[in-house]
Image (cartoon, rainbow, N blue to C red):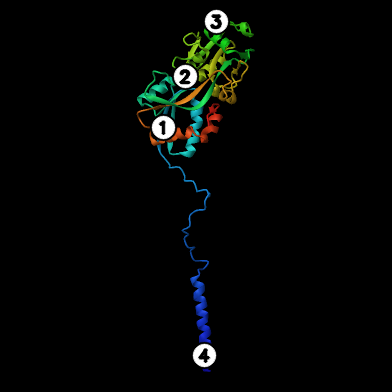
Amino acid sequence: MMKKKTLAMLLSAALCVSLFAGCSGGSANSPAPESSAPAAEGSTPVSEAPTQLSGIVNTNGSTSMEKVIGYLTEGFKEVQPGVTVHYTGSGSGAGVTGAQDGTCDIGLASRDLKDDETGVKQITVAKDGIAIIVNPENPVADLSVEQIAQLATGEIANWSEVGGNDGAVVFIGREAGSGTRDGFESITDTKDACKYQNELTSTGEVIANVASNPNAIGYASLSAVDETVKAITVGGVEATEETVLDGSYAIQRNFNFIINESSPLSEAAQTFVDWATSAEASDLIAGAGAVPLV
């Protein structure tokens, strides 16, 4: 009897030792021990979400850039929903002045800065072709830069002289200070020589006037041209994203952000500038009809 009790006690002790050993090795419900080993070389770290900002960014200037800014504003909302970007279309000259005097965070100019426009710097966000537009009823489909200049200055006064219908040329363009006007006149070498029948304050007005007059010719940002007018080729080259970027289309200019050099941008404004000039915004710029740089 004593031998049976001793044997039972030994078996019981062995069982306890076995159970204790199993518990000390961990169980399915036990938390895994933390690893102090470094991440494997070449592994991709998890990217951090961008810091969420809030605030208002005021932009002012070129009406030719309205569509581009509209697309960028909508895209930036998805990145920084707490930031509101406002746009006022007052012309490139007003955009430069606004950046100089601090009445806007970012000026918009569809031309490069002039030598006397100091205290600010330009950041090119896109390129744009200046389309030469005529009424859809006009049979003229192609003109050289020289012919366009002659039509603008009145040296060619009738459409029949360039293969069109018999009719007096009506030249329509933008007001003094417009970046589109400055770009057109600089490229065609017609500064202060154009004979305007109408000088209008927005790209949309130029397009509407050309669309309503069979004898009209004007210029407008490629990004703004619609089916109500006809964009002619210049020297046989169509104004497209590809021809603007490779330089084969002759009448083109830069779309620029104008920034005050002495007053730092707010964090929200600087983030918008950085994002708008990155590859992330390229598809939006192209969607607006302009030519992205990256």
Per the image, the residue denoted by label 2 is 179
Q: Residues within 10 Å of mark 4 (few under 14, many from 20)?
A: few
Q: Nearer the viewer, mark 1 or mark 2?
A: 2
Q: Residue furthest front?
A: 41
Q: Nearer the viewer, mark 1 or mark 4?
A: 4
Q: CA distance from mark 4 to mark 2?
A: 106 Å
Task: Give the secondary structure at mark 3.
Answer: loop
Tell me where residue 28 appears, x and y as whole percent: 53, 66
Q: Which of the 4 image quadrants contains residue 251? A: top right
Relative side of 79 to 236, left or right: left
The disc labelled 4 sits on which kind of residue? Lys
The disc labelled 1 sits on which kind of residue? Val
Per the image, the residue denoted by label 4 is 5
Q: CA distance from mark 3 to mark 1?
A: 46 Å
Tell me where residue 103 appears, x and y as whole percent: 37, 26
Mark 4 or mark 2, earlier in chain? 4
Tell me where residue 229 appears, x and y as whole percent: 59, 18
Label disc, if present, on residue 155 of the rendered structure: 3
